[in-house]
Image (tube, rainbow, N blue to C red):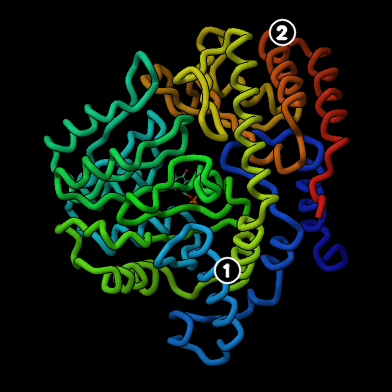
């Protein structure tokens, strides 16, 4: 590549150095293994395979059929599922496919407010989900930063949505999917659990499982699951849980075929078989005991980091974390989310600015930052390093002078130098 396209080669190298030398705290990012990387960059990218294994619209699919079937079986084992679809190109497309399968345009949905921690695809007016469907929202309590399930129930009873979406991009606490299901049943709604963020923790039994309670689950494969960028749709084995009457069909086989059609041809063309192979590898990795240890460490690291922030008088929404992330309201530190993101970027720590519930700043400025431990834990960093990272962040945010920034950059490089990206 260096000989043919020096420009792109150099930029990839520059990004490799950025990822290697810096501290990556974006809660939705991770470092995949070399094997996942290899599959994602493999010749499978050349293959068109519209359709599903055994029923394709193109010839020459016998090999990719085997790969996709392996990915499906591994994902089913990982999530104790009856049905999965491994083709969605992203978490957003997984959600789109579910909406296609379960709703008609104009139907009402109830989702987690984006400005309180939800995702764009949960009904935001700037997204297809808020344009095609009538949106309504639940949020967190101002005093506690927590979901109040009784209030969610009240909203559901009042709004009568056809689908309720449980799941978030910036909620650091356990989500009670059982309670969500009770609410959905009460109003005869379909329950979609979007477990994009905590999927890895859920797969290893560290957080409450959504699969037995939600009619349908969706996830990304690249956050805590540590696979390639992509999406996944899951339905559980629990036949005792009848689907809500508002689903177009009452049985799993029919629902599976609606979901498959929702993905292809509903909202995608040919699946990315190189990514599906990389997903298969990531699922195999996630089935291992090593991955359980990794997830346990991700959660421990987040807890230690959150406690250290609180000890230094940072205001964490909900006061702490149960998962891999935390949302920090910086208003008492006299810095906006945007400024903090930029400042930390200067010392090679990557975070993202994030709205906090009841934010007084715009989404481009924000009052908070979101921090996650999935990526740094993949590099092998443990509790002691979490305390060091909080110390670096705190000194950076408190002091801000240029000389200190150079010193703090060195501290970051010294810390990451001991933890190579790839250990397998
Ligand atoms: N759902 C949730 C809860 C998310 O946090 C995200 C991504 O951040 C998505 C869906 C969408 O994933 P993607 O960026 O792959 O479309």
Q: Residue at x 52, y 21 (%)?
A: 320
Task: Choose between 54 and 359: the one closer to the eye.
Answer: 54
* Residue 386 in which image quadrant: top right
Residue identified by numbered label 1: 276
* Residue 64 in which image quadrant: bottom right
Instruction: Decide: few, some or many residues near mark 1? Use Cα within 10 Å; few <14, some 14-19, many ≥20.
Output: many
Task: Choose between 148 and 221: the one closer to the eye.
Answer: 148
Instruction: Decide: few, some or many residues near mark 2? Use Cα within 10 Å; few <14, some 14-19, many ≥20.
Output: few
Q: How many marks?
A: 2
Residue 265, label in figure: none
The residue lying furthest to the front in this view is 240
Q: Residue at x 46, y 38 (%)?
A: 169
313 lies above or below 216: above
In the picture, measured across the screen, residue 75 lies left or right of residue 9, that is left
* Pointer 2 or 1: first along the chain: 1
Indicate if the residue with disc 2 has its beta carbon within 8 Å of ligand 1: no
Asked if the residue at tag 1 contacts the one at tag 2, i.e. Cβ–Cβ closer than 8 Å, the answer is: no
For label 2, the SS is helix
Q: Residue at x 57, y 74 (%)?
A: 70
For label 1, the SS is helix
- The image shows residue 317 at horizontal and vertical percentages of 46, 20
- The image shows residue 28 at horizontal and vertical percentages of 57, 42
What is the distance, in whole Å, between disc 2 and disc 1 at their CAs? 46 Å
Task: Choose between 377 and 104: the one closer to the eye.
Answer: 377
Q: Residue at x 53, y 41 (%)?
A: 206
Residue identified by numbered label 2: 399
Which of the two marks, 2 or 1, is nearer to us in this view?
1
Instruction: State the quadrant of the C terminus.
Output: bottom right
- The image shows residue 355 at horizontal and vertical percentages of 45, 26
Instruction: State the quadrant of the N terminus.
Output: bottom right
408 lies above or below 168: above
């Amino acid at each position: 590549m260096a000989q043919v396209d020096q420009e792109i080669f150099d930029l990839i190298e520059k990004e490799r150095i950025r990822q290697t030398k810096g501290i990556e705290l974006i809660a939705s990012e991770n470092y995949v293994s070399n094997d996942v990387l290899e599959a994602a960059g493999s010749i499978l990218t050349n293959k068109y395979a519209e359709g599903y294994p055994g029923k394709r619209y193109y010839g020459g699919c016998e090999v990719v059929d085997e790969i996709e079937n392996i990915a499906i079986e591994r994902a089913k084992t990982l999530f104790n599922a009856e049905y999965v679809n491994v083709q969605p190109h992203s978490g957003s497309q997984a959600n789109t496919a579910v909406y296609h399968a379960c709703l008609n345009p104009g139907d009402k949905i109830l989702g987690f407010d984006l400005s309180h921690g939800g995702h764009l695809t949960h009904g935001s007016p700037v997204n297809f989900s808020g344009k095609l469907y009538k949106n309504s929202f639940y949020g967190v309590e101002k005093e506690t930063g927590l979901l109040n399930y009784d209030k969610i129930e009240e909203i559901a009873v009042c709004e009568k949505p056809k689908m309720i979406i449980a799941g978030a991009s910036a909620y650091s606490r356990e989500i009670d999917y059982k309670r969500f299901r009770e609410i959905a049943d009460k109003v005869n709604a379909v329950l979609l659990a979007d477990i994009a963020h905590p999927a890895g923790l859920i797969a290893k039994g560290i957080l409450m499982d959504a699969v037995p309670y939600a009619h349908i689950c969706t996830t990304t494969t690249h956050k805590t699951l540590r696979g390639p960028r992509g999406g996944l749709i899951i339905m559980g084995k629990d036949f005792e849980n009848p689907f809500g009457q508002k689903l177009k069909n009452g049985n799993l086989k029919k629902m599976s075929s609606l979901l498959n059609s929702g993905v292809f041809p509903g909202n995608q063309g040919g699946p990315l078989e190189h990514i599906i192979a990389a997903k298969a590898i990531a699922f195999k990795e996630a089935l291992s005991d090593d991955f359980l240890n990794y997830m346990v460490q991700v959660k421990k690291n987040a807890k230690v980091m959150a406690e250290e922030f609180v000890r230094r008088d940072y205001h964490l929404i909900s006061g702490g974390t149960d998962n891999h992330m935390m949302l920090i309201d910086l208003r008492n530190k006299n810095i906006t989310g945007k400024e903090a993101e930029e400042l930390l970027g200067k010392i090679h720590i990557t975070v993202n600015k994030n709205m906090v519930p009841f934010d007084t700043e715009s989404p481009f400025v924000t009052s908070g930052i979101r921090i996650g431990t999935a990526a740094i834990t993949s590099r092998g960093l443990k509790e002691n390093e979490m305390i060091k990272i909080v110390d670096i962040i705190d000194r950076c945010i408190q002091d801000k002078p240029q000389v200190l920034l150079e010193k703090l950059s060195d501290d970051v490089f010294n810390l990451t130098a001991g933890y190579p990206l790839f250990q397998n």
